[in-house]
Image: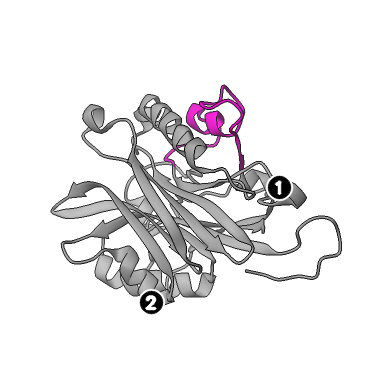
Amino acid sequence: MADQTTTTGLIETNLRVLSWNIWWRYGPWQSRQPAIVETLKNLDCDIIALQEVWQDDKTNNAAILAAELGYHHVFAASMEREGFGFGNALLSRWPISQSQSVMLYGTEENGEGRCALYAEIEGPRGSLPFFATHLNWKFEHSHIRQRQVADLARFVDAKANFAFPPVVCGDFNADPMSEEIRMLTGLTTCPVEGLAFQDAWIAARNDNSGFTWDNANPYAVEILEPNRRIDYILAGMPRERGAGHVVSCEVVAKDPVNEVYPSDHYGVVAQLRY
């Protein structure tokens, strides 16, 4: 968290947030793990939302990563693959006072479970409502993702009554102009009236692609899908003195660590006024 001297009516201190899909136990996952740890340490974020986090009968990767960073964490599995859990996690520099997860639409229709995870984080200047999620992955599943987004919006609306706006992070597997993203960013009918988010990448006035699924990544290129921006940090509309306003946003975790790419996805880091 960056501290600055207050010179205007706006909040001048920033919260640093990461969203990143860390690719479960796929590929060379054991050699990727040190690269993930090193990348997280170098990014030095206050709050971290992770997708495709694995769980076994003794622990989960969120707990392992949190221990490496000295952070607090919560984890929620949404399904099981090959005998291991698969889900979302939130890691925080500050204590987590409560958490909850909810399953999203589509398990019966698709055979894959997806969930949204909530954590109330006790930051030094007030409580922070954070959410992590991961939606269906197939191109043709927009109709499922739209219903998942509606479930997500209702979940957020029930939880996020704070001075700081809700922040939703995740791998949405959807382009910025897809109906499901437009539903959250106020460009079409919102699932919950009055609940809309700023796409941090757009709010920060970036003028390049922001691809998080990029064929420059050797793991991604094997899947034969086009480059896309599908990973997001979505911030609720700024509150008093600009709380939650997006100051900057960048794509991160693009480089190998000791010749190992940490994931098939790149991550997104945003700085928000807090």
Q: Nearer the viewer, mark 1 or mark 2?
A: 2
Determine which residue is flagged by label 2: 68
Which quadrant: the C terminus? bottom right
Q: Is residue 258 among what the camera can see?
A: no
> Does the magenta-highlighted stretch encompass residue 252?
no
Earlier-in-chain disc, 1 versus 2 = 2
Q: Could you tell me the amino acid type at mark 1?
A: Arg
Residue lying farthest to the top in this orientation: 189
Q: Nearer the viewer, residue 112 or 6?
A: 6
Would residue 214 be found to the left or right of residue 273 on screen?
left
Query: Left or right: 141 with respect to 188?
Result: left
At mark 1, the secondary structure is: loop
Secondary structure mostly taken by the magenta-highlighted segment of the chain: loop
> Quadrant of the image for the N terminus?
bottom right
Up the image or down, 27 lies above or below 220; here it is: below
Give the image location of residue 55, x and y in percent: 23, 59
Depth check: give the residue in front, 170 or 173: 170
Question: Pointers 1 and 2 in contact (CB under 8 A)?
Answer: no
In this rendering, is residue 134 above or below 22? above
- Residue visible at 43% across and 27% down in the picture: 146
Q: Residue at x 54, y 33 (%)?
A: 184
Quick one: 263 or 155, which is closer to the camera?
155
Q: Where 251 sits versus 110, above or below? A: below
Extent of the magenta region: 172-198
From the top left corner, tell me how far across and down residue 210 is, in percent.
57, 49
Residue 185, picture quadrant: top right
Q: Is residue 36 above or below residue 246?
A: below
Q: How far apart, in angstroms, are the residues tagged by discs 1 and 2?
A: 34 Å
Q: For this view, does 260 lie left or right of residue 187?
A: left
Which residue was labeled with disc 1?
205
